Amino acid sequence: MMENPDLTAQWEEVESMLTERFGKTPNLETILFLIGIQELGQVKKKFTKEQKEDLMHIAMCTILSPDGYYDLEKYDEEGWPHFKEMKKVHGMKLEEQEHFLKQHIIAYFRTHHNLTRVDLHGVHH
């Protein structure tokens, strides 16, 4: 699969913004973790392994919601969002999956942050 030069440039813009904010370039998993924290709106110094996985799930649901894959169902008593799967993400090769996620992450930052800021103070992954 050929890499899309526009996607590459836009992804580098996301990485650059986050690198500037956190002092190192985050990988895809870390970016999903950060989106999850942003969406949860609760910043803690430490998250359990299970909470980190939940945060990444929140991120996945959030970035795929605009395309109808998930719908926000409710928030629980602790303020954690819960999503309902609306349609399946069909099987993709790893490279296609990464491309798909990058496109949705770029769209998320375009919509929510104009690719200019992420407001996550004092978070340690």
Image (spheres, helix red, strand yellow):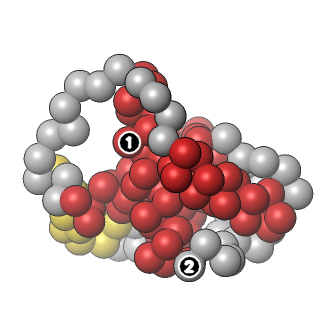
- In the picture, measured across the screen, residue 57 lies left or right of residue 68, that is right
Give x and y (percent) for residue 125: 72, 48
Give x and y (percent) for residue 70: 21, 57
For residue 47, say whether it is visible.
Answer: no
Where disc 2 sits, the SS reads loop
- In the picture, measured across the screen, residue 68 lies left or right of residue 36, that is left
> Marks 1 and 2: in contact by CB < 8 Å?
no
Q: Image height check: is 63 above or below 25? A: below
User: Badge 1 local density, few (<14 within 10 Å), some, or many (20+)?
Assistant: some
Q: Look at label 2 and name its amino acid.
A: Asn
Where disc 1 sits, the SS reads helix
| Distance CA(mark 2)–CA(mark 1) | 20 Å
Q: Residue at label 1?
A: 100
Give x and y (percent) for residue 81: 34, 66
Q: Residue at label 2?
A: 114
Q: Image height check: is 82 above or below 43? A: above
Q: Which mark is residue 12?
A: none
Which quadrant holds residue 62? bottom left
Observer-nearest of 124 and 63? 63
Q: Residue at x 56, y 78 (%)?
A: 113
- In the picture, measured across the screen, residue 70 lies left or right of residue 60, that is left
Q: Residue at x 30, y 72 (%)?
A: 75
Q: Look at label 1 and name its amino acid.
A: Phe
User: Badge 2 local density, few (<14 within 10 Å), some, or many (20+)?
Assistant: few
Q: Residue at x 76, y 73 (%)?
A: 121
Q: Image height check: is 89 above or below 25? A: above
Q: Quadrant of the N terminus?
A: top left
Q: Residue at x 46, y 28 (%)?
A: 2
For residue 3, say whether it is visible.
Answer: yes
